[in-house]
Image: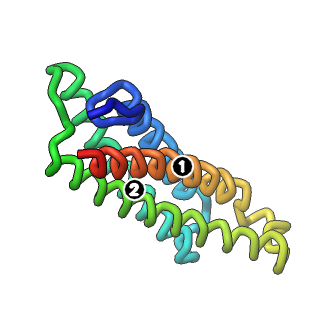
């Protein structure tokens, strides 16, 4: 089997997981630090989705570290199937959460001009959404790599 960039148990795979984790955690922190986020379902969904993304990425980053330290191969069909399902589920959830939160911010900013109100922290919401989309980009890349690896078995 050919070694792909982003494969589990490699340095590139670990960097994908760390990128997912960092941006998901940044999105959660930015959203949670914004006053009044709990009043909007899209931002609650963003926190839940990015929290799940962060936990999934942390677990797989630890697994990658273990594989790198002890020179283990993580390319078995069972493990790759688990990685594919987990990556696709978290990628779809994070994309949906990012899009829904972005839609709410666009509504606030361009349609009802609520971002002119200094009590609504639109800047933090925008930062959280940008981090969520970056986390999704890493997650989608990882999901495609895992799917390609599983298909090549």
Q: Is residue 2 above or below residue 114?
A: above
Mark 1 residue element: helix
Mark 2 residue element: helix
Residue found at x 57% / y 67%: 37
Instruction: In this rendered view, identify the residue nearer to me: 153 or 96.
Output: 153
Residue found at x 65% / y 59%: 125
> Residue 43, labelled with which disc?
none
Q: How many residues crowd around disc 1 within 10 Å: few (fewer than 14), some, or many (20 or more)? A: some
Residue found at x 35% / y 52%: 147
**Image-quadrant location for residue 36:** bottom right
Estimate the x, y position of residue 32 in percent, counting from the top left: 52, 57
Residue found at x 84% / y 72%: 110
The C terminus: image quadrant: top left
Q: Is residue 69 above or below residue 93?
A: above
Estimate the x, y position of residue 146 in percent, counting from the top left: 34, 47
**Image-quadrant location for residue 82:** bottom left
What whole-number distance in Å separates the C-alpha atoms at marks 1 and 2?
16 Å
* Total numbered labels placed on residues in the image: 2
Instruction: In this rendered view, identify the residue nearer to me: 31 or 107.
Output: 107
Q: Is residue 115 above or below residue 72?
A: below
- Kindly report which numbered mark, 1 or 2, lies closer to the viewer in this rendering: 1
Is disc 1 in contact with disc 2, using a CB cutoff of under 8 Å? no
Q: How many residues crowd around disc 2 within 10 Å: few (fewer than 14), some, or many (20 or more)? A: some
Residue at numbered disc 1: 137
Question: Horizontally, is 122 left or right of 153 in the view?
Answer: right
The N terminus: image quadrant: top left
Q: Earlier in the sequence, mark 1 or mark 2?
A: 2
Residue at numbered disc 2: 51
Estimate the x, y position of residue 120 in percent, counting from the top left: 72, 66
Instruction: In this rendered view, identify the residue nearer to me: 93 or 1.
Output: 1
Colour theme: rainbow
């Amino acid at each position: 089997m050919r070694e792909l960039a982003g494969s589990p148990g490699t340095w590139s795979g670990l960097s994908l997981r760390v990128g997912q984790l960092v941006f998901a955690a940044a999105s959660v922190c930015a959203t949670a630090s914004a006053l009044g986020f709990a009043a909007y379902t899209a931002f609650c969904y963003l926190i839940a989705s990015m929290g799940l993304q962060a936990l999934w990425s942390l677990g797989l980053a630890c697994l990658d570290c273990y594989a790198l330290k002890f020179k283990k191969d993580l390319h078995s069909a069972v493990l790759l199937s688990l990685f594919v399902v987990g990556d696709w589920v978290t990628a779809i959830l994070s994309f949906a959460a990012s899009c829904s939160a972005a839609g709410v911010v666009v509504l606030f900013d361009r349609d009802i001009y609520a971002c002119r109100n200094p009590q609504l922290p639109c800047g933090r919401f925008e930062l959280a959404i940008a981090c969520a989309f970056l986390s999704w980009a890493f997650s989608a890349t990882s999901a495609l790599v895992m799917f390609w690896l599983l298909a090549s078995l």
